[in-house]
Structure formats: structure tokens, C-alpha cells
């Protein structure tokens, strides 16, 4: 199962988060201050520092957490391509803010117990909030068995998430759960958050800074759907392009699966025709066509 075209093309927000998370993790680890980044009741209430909250939301405390965390952030860039960088920025800010508030509340509630003294640091909120649309919107396209155990093409992502969730046991479990709650609140459109957008000036500024260059290659054409329509018309007229075999009409179940992900039915049919009924490839085509 693929996360779309390679690299950070059309995913500048994800690129910024991955770069910031990786850089801060390395810097604090080199200074042997990584373990002090996690939020704690004493650090928030008695020794409050704004930079601690910012660093805690981005920098991982160990190499395994960094590896799994950056992998998941990179994979979930597919959602930025699907909803656009502007709305994905709102999604990121909302989930990080809500999760941070929930984490602080959990520390206040547990301050008189020995359950946990400090939480793990890192972008747990954004990662686990992204598991909500991953679970609800990304369909299973293949299943297989290993040593009698059933798996799907989504299983590895779930296993990577489980590894990250339990990496520091109670210290990482609470931030992960808070991220899931924040993602669920966004999904439920609390306070109409899904209709909100970042001011154009801010979104344009960050897009110019963090949008990766493609080394001379052009950005995906906005006429991609139109090109698919042209090719589809030629196939329907039984005039396949030179060097290509006629394409079989997509099944209604495949079209319905793409429609359930939020794509237009006609565009889904055209994408399946171009991808030769490969749902993963068709999804990538549709995401590229929707990119701003």
C-alpha cells in the first residue's frame, strides 16, 4: 500500500514537521537533554517554559521512537495531499493543541499518584490523530496470511503505530490516547473545525518556504483529470492508444470504494481506467489531481 507519489511533493506541512522533528530530536539528544523534554506536572506548573511545550510536541526522546515516528509522519502525508495543505495545517494545529491540553489535564489529575511523572515527547498527537482518517477512509485492498495469522496491506502501519504507542509504556500511552481523542474530535467537526482555513497570507508564506523543488520537473498538471477523460473516451471508442491494450471497465465495487474515500464517482472511474483497475494506483492519481 503506497502513500502517494514519492517524496514530499504537494506536502509542505508534512515536510516542515518531519524536518523540525528530526532536527530537534538530534540536537537535544546530542546535548543529552532529550529525557528532560517530556511534559511533567512540576515542569508545567512550577517551571513553566513555552519552549518546553513546543519542543515536547516535536522532539522524540530515543532513536527507535524517532525512526517509527518519522516513518508514520511521512506515510500520513497522503492526507495532506487529499485535503490540501491549508486544511491539513488546521488539522495539525487543532490536534496538537487539543492533545496538549488533554495531556496537561492528565498530569494534573495524576499528580498525586505514582502512575506517571512525565510524558514522552514527540509529535504523538499528530501521528495518532492521523490514525482516525487512516482507519475510516483508507480501504483494505489486499489480505494475506503469515504463519496462520491474517494480515492486510494496512497491518504494518498499525504495527508501527502500536510500537510507537507502547515505546515508553505509560509515558507514551497517554500522549497517544490524547492524539486519538483529538483526531476523533476533528472528525466529528467540533466547533466547525473542518470548515476552517488558514489565512492565505500565512499558507502562501509557508508553502513557498517548505514546498520542495523537483529538480526541474514540473508540478502535477491541473488538467490531469481532463487527460484521463481523453484517454477514457478513446478506450470506450475501442481505439486504444498505440502500444496499450484495451482497458477493462472498472467494477462498481472499486468505484464505490474510491467514492467512499471522498472522490467524485466519474473521476474515480477515469482513474481506475488509467490505473488498469489498481485501486492503490488510482488513489494516487486522484490525490495528485486534487493537489493545489
Image (cartoon, rainbow, N blue to C red):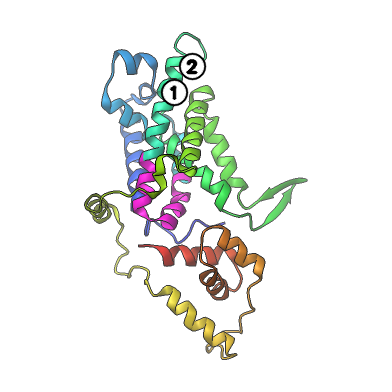
Contact between labelled residues 1 and 2, with CB atoms less than 8 Å apart: yes
Q: Which residue is mark 2?
A: 116
Q: Which residue is mark 1?
A: 119
Left-right relation of 159 to 203 = right
Q: Assess disc 2: are there few (<14), some (14-19) or many (≥20) residues with their C-alpha within 10 Å of its C-alpha.
A: some
Q: Is 139 situated above or below 270? A: above
Identified at 40% across, 22% down, the residue is 104
When asked about the image quadrant of residue 92, the answer is top left
Q: Is 109 situated above or below 50? A: above
Find the magenta span and give its range.
Answer: 72-93
Left-right relation of 217 to 64 = left
Q: Is 100 situated above or below 229? A: above
Q: Assess disc 1: are there few (<14), some (14-19) or many (≥20) residues with their C-alpha within 10 Å of its C-alpha.
A: many
Q: Is residue 83 magenta?
A: yes
Q: State how many labels appear.
A: 2
Q: Is residue 122 magenta?
A: no
Identified at 43% across, 78% down, the residue is 226
Seen as rendered, the residue at the extreme top is 112
Quarter of the image with the N terminus in it: bottom right
Expressed as whole percent of the image width and height from the top left, the position of residue 53 reads: 32, 27
Expressed as whole percent of the image width and height from the top left, the position of residue 277 reads: 61, 71
| Callout 2 secondary element | loop
Label ID, residue 13: none
Amino acid at each position: 500500500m503506497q502513500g502517494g507519489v514519492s517524496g514530499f511533493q504537494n506536502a509542505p506541512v508534512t515536510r516542515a514537521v518531519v524536518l523540525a522533528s528530526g532536527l530537534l530530536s538530534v540536537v537535544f539528544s546530542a546535548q543529552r537533554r532529550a529525557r528532560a523534554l517530556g511534559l511533567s506536572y512540576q515542569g508545567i506548573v512550577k517551571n513553566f517554559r513555552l519552549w518546553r511545550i513546543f519542543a515536547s510536541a516535536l522532539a522524540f526522546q530515543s532513536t527507535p521512537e524517532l525512526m517509527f515516528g518519522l516513518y508514520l509522519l511521512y506515510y500520513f502525508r497522503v492526507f495532506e495531499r487529499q485535503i490540501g495543505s491549508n486544511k491539513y495545517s488546521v488539522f495539525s494545529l487543532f490536534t496538537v493543541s487539543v492533545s496538549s491540553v488533554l495531556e496537561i489535564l492528565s498530569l494534573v489529575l495524576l499528580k498525586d499518584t505514582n502512575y506517571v511523572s512525565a510524558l514522552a515527547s514527540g509529535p504523538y498527537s499528530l501521528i495518532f490523530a492521523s490514525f482516525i482518517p487512516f482507519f475510516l477512509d483508507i480501504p483494505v485492498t489486499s489480505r494475506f496470511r503469515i504463519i496462520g495469522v491474517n494480515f492486510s496491506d494496512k497491518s504494518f502501519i498499525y504495527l508501527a503505530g502500536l510500537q510507537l504507542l507502547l515505546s515508553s509504556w505509560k509515558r507514551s500511552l497517554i500522549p497517544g490516547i490524547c492524539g486519538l481523542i483529538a483526531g476523533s474530535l476533528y472528525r466529528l467537526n467540533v466547533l466547525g473545525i473542518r470548515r476552517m482555513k488558514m489565512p492565505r497570507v500565512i499558507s502562501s508564506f509557508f508553502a513557498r518556504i517548505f514546498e520542495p523543488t523537483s529538480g526541474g520537473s514540473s508540478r502535477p498538471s491541473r488538467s490531469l483529470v481532463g487527460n484521463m477523460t481523453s484517454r477514457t473516451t478513446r478506450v470506450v471508442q475501442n481505439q486504444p492508444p498505440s502500444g496499450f491494450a484495451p482497458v477493462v471497465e472498472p467494477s462498481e465495487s472499486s468505484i464505490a470504494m474510491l467514492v467512499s474515500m471522498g472522490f467524485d464517482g466519474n473521476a474515480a472511474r477515469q482513474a481506475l481506467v488509467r490505473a488498469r483497475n489498481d485501486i492503490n494506483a488510482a488513489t494516487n492519481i486522484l490525490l495528485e489531481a486534487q493537489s493545489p
